[in-house]
Image (tube, grey):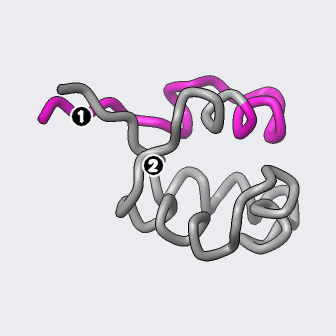
Amino acid sequence: MLKVKVKTNDIERLLAKRNLSHNAFAERLGISSGYMSQLVRGERYPSAELRVKILRSLRNVTFDEIFEINDF
């Protein structure tokens, strides 16, 4: 089964570059700050809908810059 995971270091770098905290980004995405933390730590996998929201919210980033696909 394929799972899409957030690349921790890359998402942290992109958020810092945009002066966004996890809480502010979570609010922008419409998710809880706890869920955002789980995504960043690699404990949860974002749905397809959430991946689209993340990409649209960060703008000018590619899928491969912030996500990795794991085969379980």
Total marks drawn?
A: 2
* Residue plotted at (79% across, 40% down): 58
**Disc 1 residue type (three-letter):** Asn
Q: Quadrant of residue 35?
A: bottom right
Q: Quadrant of residue 25?
A: bottom right
**Disc 2 residue type (three-letter):** Lys
- Magenta region includes residue 23: no
- Magenta region includes residue 59: yes
In the rendered image, which quarter contains the C terminus?
top left
- Above or below, comparing residue 56 to residue 46 in the picture: above
| Residue denoted by label 2 | 7
Task: Say few, some or many: other residues with alpha carbon within 10 Å of mark 2 (under 14 / 14 to 19 / 20 or more).
Answer: some
> What element does badge 1 sit on?
strand
- Above or below, comparing residue 7 to residue 68 in the picture: below
* Residue plotted at (55% across, 51% down): 10
Give the numbered dot on residue 70.
Answer: 1
> What element does badge 2 sit on?
loop
* Residue plotted at (55% across, 71% down): 37
Q: Position of residue 51 (x, y in %)?
A: 61, 34
Q: Position of residue 15 (x, y in %)?
A: 74, 59
Marks 2 and 1, the one that precedes in the sequence: 2
Q: In the shown orientation, is residue 16 left or right of residue 40?
A: right
Task: Say few, some or many: other residues with alpha carbon within 10 Å of mark 1 (under 14 / 14 to 19 / 20 or more).
Answer: few
C-alpha separation, residue under disc 2 versus residue under disc 1: 11 Å
Q: Nearer the viewer, mark 2 or mark 1?
A: 1
Q: Position of residue 50 (x, y in %)?
A: 64, 38
Residues shaded magenta: 53-72
Q: In the shown orientation, is residue 23 left or right of residue 3?
A: right
Tags 2 and 1 touching, CB below 8 Å: no
Q: Nearer the viewer, residue 18 or 44?
A: 44
In the rendered image, which quarter contains the N terminus?
top left
